[in-house]
Image: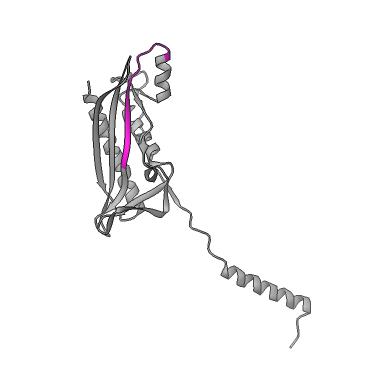
Amino acid sequence: MRRLPAVAFGAVLLAAALAGCAGLAPDKPARATLYDFGPGATAAQPAGRQPPLASLVLADIEASASLDGSAVLYRLGYANPNELRPYAHARWSAPPPQLIRQRLRQQLARERAVLDPGDSAALARNGGVAPRVLRLDLEEFSQVFESQAQSWGLLRLRATVMDNTPGGERLLSQRSFVVRQPASTPDAPGGVRALAAATDAAAEQIEQWLAQLR
């Protein structure tokens, strides 16, 4: 049998060693999937149409540290409902308070001008009338499992409306909103869809509540 030259034999051994190392190398960590609430309403407001309701300042939504991150959270209601757990490979594209505020703003802006807190301060400096302020506290935003196969998206918000007066802000009204929507699948995509639906439902309820305030 013909022997390989020493150089060629060394190359074969090196290639085999590299192949073995490649086989032992750990797999790259799975990349997390990013979620949001989808595009929302796509119909544009007719040009020249004036919103029928008074303008409103929408403050940033307050939340605990656990709800102000990017993790998609769930609870095992049938095992340990007091423990919030994050999905390993699912993330929100932005913290839930920001996503909820964006969706709520889209909903409210159909019937009124929605301002940021800085816009209100500019109006006051220029002698304008400062509009009412809507403040929201996010208390729950998770997928809750009744069993291994059944779950829902649970959203709980506390909403406070403040009137701007010459003496400062005055409490006008406060209300809690609790909305839950069934998840179509017992996993992160199902939970995300359920939480998006719960947010849309809460936005509609808040809009109706605000329209009743005088």
Q: Nearer the viewer, residue 39 or 211?
A: 211
**Which quadrant of the structure image shows residue 87?**
bottom left
Is residue 22 placed above or below 101 in the rendered structure? Answer: below
From the image, which quarter does the C terminus lie in?
Answer: top left
Is residue 68 placed above or below 54 in the rendered structure? Answer: below
- On the rendered structure, is 2 left or right of 186? right
Chosen colour scheme: one colour
Answer whether residue 151 is visible to the viewer in this image: yes
Q: Residue at x 32, y 39 (%)?
A: 138
Q: Nearer the viewer, residue 133 or 22?
A: 133
Is residue 213 placed above or below 42 in the rendered structure? Answer: above
Q: Residue at x 28, y 29 (%)?
A: 160
Answer whether residue 39 is visible to the viewer in this image: no
Q: Residue 202 appears at what percent x and percent y? A: 27, 37
Q: Nearer the viewer, residue 18 or 43?
A: 18
Q: Residue 121 appears at what percent x and percent y? A: 41, 19
Farthest residue to the top: give it: 127
Q: Residue 143 appears at what percent x and percent y? A: 31, 50
From the image, which quarter does the N terminus lie in?
Answer: bottom right
Q: Residue at x 65, y 70 (%)?
A: 18
Q: Residue at x 25, y 58 (%)?
A: 78
Q: Which residues are magenta?
A: 125-139
- On the rendered structure, is 69 left or right of 110? right
